[in-house]
Amino acid sequence: MRRGILIAAIMILIPVCTFAASPKVVEKWLIHNEEEMLKWNAAGLEQVEITSEGIFFDLEEKAAFFRSPPEGFKEDIDAMHAYITIPELLAGENIEEVALLVLSLKDDGEIAHRLRIGFTIEQGSTDIYVPLAHYRKDMGSADVIAISFKGNAKNIKFEGIKFLKHSLGQKIIASWRSFWILEPFTPHTINILVGPVITTDYMMADDWYDNWHLNGISANAYMLVGISLFGVAILFYTGLFSKRKWEDDRKRIVIIFFVFIASIWILYDFRMGVEFVRNVAIDHVQYISEDEETRTFRDRDRFYDFAKFVKSFVKDRETYEVFLPDPWPYFGSMRYYTYPSIPNPGDPVSDTWVVYEREDIVLREDNKLYHAGEAFTDAGEVIGQFSERSFVFREFTN
C-alpha cells in the first residue's frame, strides 16, 4: 500500500519537474565566416556582409538559403532551431514571410513536392523552434531544405540552423508533462473537449494546446492500446506460469484487469476534475470577483461588458454600424445584447457607429472617423467612451 502511494506521488510530481539536459545538437549549420557560407547555396541576396555573428543582407522581394539536408534528416532529427534577426523596419519596409521549405525533387531537378512551414517573426533576435518530427509524414523525399524570405527590408541577419534530437528520457517526460497540460474553457468546449494529448517533443510539451494540431496523439489511443496489451499480457503470464486451475485463475484475471481499468479511469477523472476546478477558479479570479472596470472574461477580454455598455446608447436606433476585431463571434453577440436594436451587416444606413478594440479607427480634429487615412463618417461626436479604442460615435444631425 505504501509503495503504491509512493509511486502515485512520484507520478503526480513528475509534471512539475524540469528536465535539466538540453536536446542533443546533431549538426550545426552556422554562418560565421566565408568558409561556412560556401556550404550553402543562396539566391536573391543584396548587399551581403559576412561577420562572426552571421550573414547580413538586404531583402528585395525574395531571397533564400538552401542546401541538402543532413544525414538521417527524416529518421533521426526531431527538431531544429533557426537563428534570424529582423531589424527595426523603416517606412516602406515589410517582412511578408519567413519560412522553412522542404523540397522533394524529380530526376530532372524539378520540384515534385514542397512542404512549407511558415514562421512567426518579430523584430529583434529570434530563435525559431521547428518540431520537425511532427512533419515527417509530409516531407516526401526531402532532397533540399531552405529558409526563404519575402518582403522588402535592409540588414537582416541569418546566423544559421541547429538540428536537434531528443533523448528517450526527454520523450518520456514530455509525454507525461503534456498529459497534465490542462485545457482552458473556450467557445468550442460546449461541443468538443480535446482531452489530454501526448507529445514526445520536450520543447513543446508545455504548449501543446496552442499547437495541438501538431502535437502527437490523443492519450485515449495510448490508453486503449495499453489496456489491450495489459489484458493479453496477463493471459499469457497466467497460461505460462500459473499452476492453479483455470477456474481459479479466470476470476483472478478478471479482477486484475478491471482494477487496471479502474485505475486509469480514476487517473482520467482526477485530471478532468482538476481541469474544471482550475478553469472555474480562473473565471472567479479574473471575472466574477473583479471590479467591472477591470474584469476580463476568457478570450473575450472585456467584450461582454462593452456590449452591455453599448445598449443604452443604441436603444433608440433600429440599427447601428459596427467595427469589431472579427465578425465572429462578436457580431452575433452584439445582436443578442443590444436587441431589438441590431448591428447592420451591410452598407452604412445609420448615424451611430460602435467601435470595439480597433486602434486603426481614429477620430480626427474635423470630428470624423477615419480608417486607413480616409474619412468614412460625417462629423459627429463620441457619445460613449468605454476605453481608449472602444466607443460609440454619433454623427451630428443636420
Image: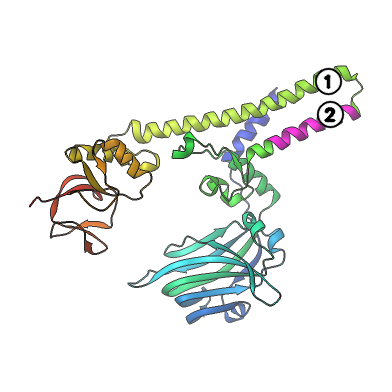
Callout 1 environment at 10 Å: few (<14), some (14 to 19), or many (20+)?
Answer: few
Q: Is residue 191 left or right of residue 198?
A: left
Give the answer, above or below, for where 174 lies relative to 31.
above
Residue 47 is situated, as x and y percent measured from the top left of the image, at: 46, 82
Q: Quadrant of residue 58?
A: bottom left
Q: Which residue is mark 1?
A: 250
The kind of residue on which mark 2 rests is Leu
Three-letter amino acid code at the position of disc 1: Arg
Q: In the rendered image, which residue does mark 2 sit on?
A: 235
Query: Is any part of residue 78 visible from this angle?
Result: no
User: In the image, which residues are magenta?
Assistant: 224-240
Counting residues from the start of the chain, the first of labels 2 and 1 encountered is 2
Please provide percent x and percent y for residue 17.
Answer: 59, 42
360 and 238: which is toward the camera: 360
Q: Secondary structure at mark 1?
A: helix
Quote the CA–CA distance across marks 2 and 1. 9 Å
Task: Work out whether residue 64 or residue 241 is closer to the camera in this orientation and state it.
Answer: 64
| Residue 239 on the magenta span | yes
Residue at 34% of width from left, 31% of height from top? 288
